[in-house]
Image (tube, rainbow, N blue to C red):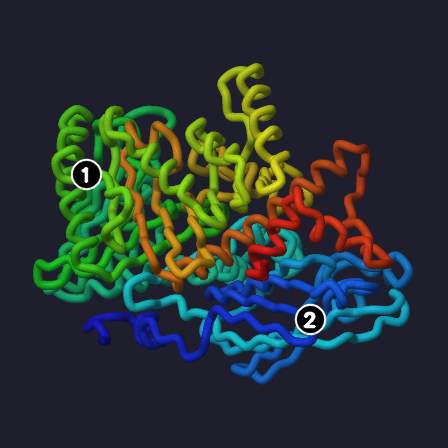
């Protein structure tokens, strides 16, 4: 059903329609390809039967875009030393194949029909020969869905590609249309989706109720102003808590600059610790119909810099629960009253889950085990767990990652050590090193490496005051490639403060494969970038001054770890290819 007043964004595609499979597994002549299509990412898990492994130097991947009638060889950065032209940049996988059993296309477009031809290459680097191929056809998800619509920006994980496209200059250094193009490329539809959601509130039948921590980006505030001018009732609670680490001055300056103080009802939250929410509830004729949530602060860094997401839920019950929470925030309650309200109105999601969507708000009292419930969800993974940690890993989740089993566990961390003292940081780093040494655990950690001016832009610009440079998303994926995945996503870090002190919101989503496919693709995009940063950090620690990716192996030796039980590559091959 088309919603009245919806902008063009909501009219551009059918809700939830899967024209062709977005998960597809094909095997041919001993070659297996398992494809999972999100919106902007298609993830391929690859495998070879034993008789096909001998002499295989890697995989060439050819993509056919049936939507735009294009065919191209996918590219990478690693090359054979023997045939490397030393030109730098991207090289064709037909000449320099991918030596991995898991690969992802990060240049896919939403709603496109693709065929991926995966071709093992044999012979010598200077004379590669094609073996039997396996092909898989998928259609990527549209960003807008019947219940869940998910939007990720490109953010800082696109550093290298940004440098190539925009002269290696930070957006503030660019001017005119070139600057607009850079910002548009970085937001990758995230800001458009936010403005589109706000734009649905057109006329006196509509209302918007929002709780925004950093309420500053002019374009978003102007969209609220336009909604109010159309007759919609616009109400915003923003973080107005006093203190150097709070955004009150910047929020109120932005409200004045955008001229929305009179047309929109903006009120500060002045009590509590941090009003860290970033949500909007859309109502029509007094009935809540949808909610925008996620990790995105309304700032330059939040929308264009850090990796962030916006998540829309088209569900009356969910929207109603957010509106009731908003009403409580609007009373500017003292923390003791707030935790009492949570205990009565927002009980923890049951274990096991009995609903497809559960909203969890904060702060709960410390005797209400919110974090323990997330721990239980994580520890219940049967096949795989993927989590982001912007501020270190809480001890409860260290327990999960130390489990002795065959579950593949990924963790993306902004930093390994977050203690207040050098000794605490050292202990944290040692704990993470011990966890990542396990054969079924993959940990990637962000590193501050000034490889170009875009990194320096992130370091210099005033951001959240929370020292997050790359990943700001907060989500957990439990068995994401299964028939019944679980997603936990929202504004809260998986920490004690987020559960018991801050104002936060999270969604626990059960059984939505469409949303899980989008999240898992973006998670792997994050992982690839973090892994690159770690490789650079290791190279620098070893005295290298000009980092270059290592060369490809000139023989089949690159396969060894993928077929030796007891290491994470073995586990990853079997999980992504969905093979025994």
Quarter of the image that includes the N terminus: bottom left
Query: Which disc number belongs to residue 515?
Result: none
Q: Place residue 212 in its image quadrant.
A: top left
Q: Position of residue 418 (x, y in %)?
A: 51, 25
**Mark 2 falls on what kind of element?**
loop
Residue that protrudes farthest toward the left in the picture: 286
In the image, is 198 to the left or to the right of 160? left
Q: Nearer the viewer, residue 132 or 196?
A: 132
In the picture of the structure, the residue carrying the numbered disc 1 is 347
Q: Nearer the viewer, residue 73 or 208?
A: 73
**Residue 176 seen by the camera:** no
Quarter of the image that includes the C terminus: bottom right
Q: Position of residue 183 (x, y in %)?
A: 50, 57
Q: Position of residue 422 (x, y in %)?
A: 57, 16
Which callout, 1 or 2, points at the residue further toward the start of the chain? Answer: 2
Residue drawn at x 34%, y 62% is 149
Tell me whether circle 1 and circle 2 mark residues in contact (CB < 8 Å): no
Q: Nearer the viewer, residue 44 or 242?
A: 44
In the picture of the structure, the residue carrying the numbered disc 2 is 30
Q: Position of residue 573 (x, y in %)?
A: 63, 55
Residue drawn at x 14%, y 66% is 203
Residue drawn at x 32%, y 61% is 148
**Mark 1 falls on what kind of element?**
loop
Label 1 and label 2: CA atoms lie apart by 51 Å
Q: Residues within 10 Å of mark 1 (few under 14, many from 20)?
A: some
The number of numbered discs placed on residues in the rendered structure image is 2
From the viewer's perspective, is residue 538 above or below residue 559? above
The mark closer to the camera, 1 or 2, is 2
């Amino acid at each position: 059903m088309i919603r009245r007043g919806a902008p063009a964004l909501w009219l551009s595609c059918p809700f939830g329609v899967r024209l062709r499979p977005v998960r597809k597994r094909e095997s041919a002549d001993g070659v297996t390809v398992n494809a999972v299509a999100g919106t902007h990412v298609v993830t391929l898990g690859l495998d070879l039967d034993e008789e096909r492994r001998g002499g295989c130097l890697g995989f060439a991947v050819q993509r056919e875009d049936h939507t735009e009638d294009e065919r191209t060889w996918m590219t990478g950065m690693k090359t054979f030393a023997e045939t490397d032209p030393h030109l730098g940049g991207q090289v064709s996988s037909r000449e320099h194949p991918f030596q991995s059993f898991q690969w992802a296309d990060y240049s896919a477009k939403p709603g496109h029909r693709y065929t991926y031809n995966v071709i093992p290459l044999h012979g010598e680097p200077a004379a590669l020969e094609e073996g039997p191929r396996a092909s898989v056809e998928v259609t990527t998800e549209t960003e807008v869905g019947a219940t869940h619509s998910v939007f990720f920006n490109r953010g800082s994980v696109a550093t290298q590609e940004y440098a190539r496209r925009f002269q290696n200059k930070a957006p503030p250094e660019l001017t005119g249309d070139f600057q607009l193009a850079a910002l548009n490329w970085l937001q990758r539809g995230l800001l458009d989706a936010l403005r589109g959601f706000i734009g649905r509130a057109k006329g006196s039948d509509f209302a918007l109720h929002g709780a925004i921590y950093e309420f500053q980006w002019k374009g978003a505030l102007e969209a609220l102003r336009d909604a109010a001018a159309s007759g919609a009732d616009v109400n915003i609670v923003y973080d107005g808590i006093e203190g150097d680490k709070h955004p009150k001055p910047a929020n109120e300056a932005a409200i004045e600059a955008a001229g929305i103080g009179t047309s929109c009802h903006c009120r500060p939250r002045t009590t509590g610790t941090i009003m860290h929410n970033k949500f909007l509830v859309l109502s029509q004729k007094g009935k809540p119909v949808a909610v925008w949530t996620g990790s995105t602060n309304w700032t330059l860094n939040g929308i264009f810099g850090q990796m962030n997401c916006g998540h829309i839920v088209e569900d009356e019950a969910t929207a109603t629960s957010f509106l009731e929470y908003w009403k409580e925030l609007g009373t500017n309650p003292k923390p003791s009253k707030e935790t009492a309200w949570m205990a009565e109105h927002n009980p923890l999601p049951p274990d096991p889950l009995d609903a497809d969507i559960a909203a969890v708000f904060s702060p709960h009292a410390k005797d209400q085990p919110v974090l323990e419930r997330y721990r239980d969800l994580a520890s219940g993974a049967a096949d795989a767990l993927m989590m982001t940690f912007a501020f270190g890993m809480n001890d409860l989740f260290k327990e999960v990652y130390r489990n002795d089993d065959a579950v593949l566990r990924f963790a993306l961390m902004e930093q390994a050590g977050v203690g207040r003292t050098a000794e605490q940081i050292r202990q944290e780093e040692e704990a993470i090193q011990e966890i990542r040494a396990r054969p079924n655990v993959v940990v990637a950690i962000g590193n501050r490496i000034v490889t170009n001016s875009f990194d320096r832009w992130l370091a210099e610009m005033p951001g959240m005051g929370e020292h997050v440079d790359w990943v700001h998303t907060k989500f957990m994926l439990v068995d994401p490639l299964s028939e019944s995945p679980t997603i936990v996503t929202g504004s809260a870090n998986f920490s004690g403060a987020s559960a018991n002190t801050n104002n936060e919101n999270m969604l626990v989503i059960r059984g939505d494969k469409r949303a899980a496919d989008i999240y898992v693709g973006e998670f792997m995009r994050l992982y690839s970038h973090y892994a690159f940063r770690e490789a650079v950090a290791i190279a620098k620690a070893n005295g290298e001054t000009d980092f270059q990716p290592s060369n490809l192996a000139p023989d089949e030796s690159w396969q060894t770890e993928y077929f030796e039980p007891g290491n994470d590559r073995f586990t990853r091959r079997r999980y992504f290819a969905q093979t025994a």
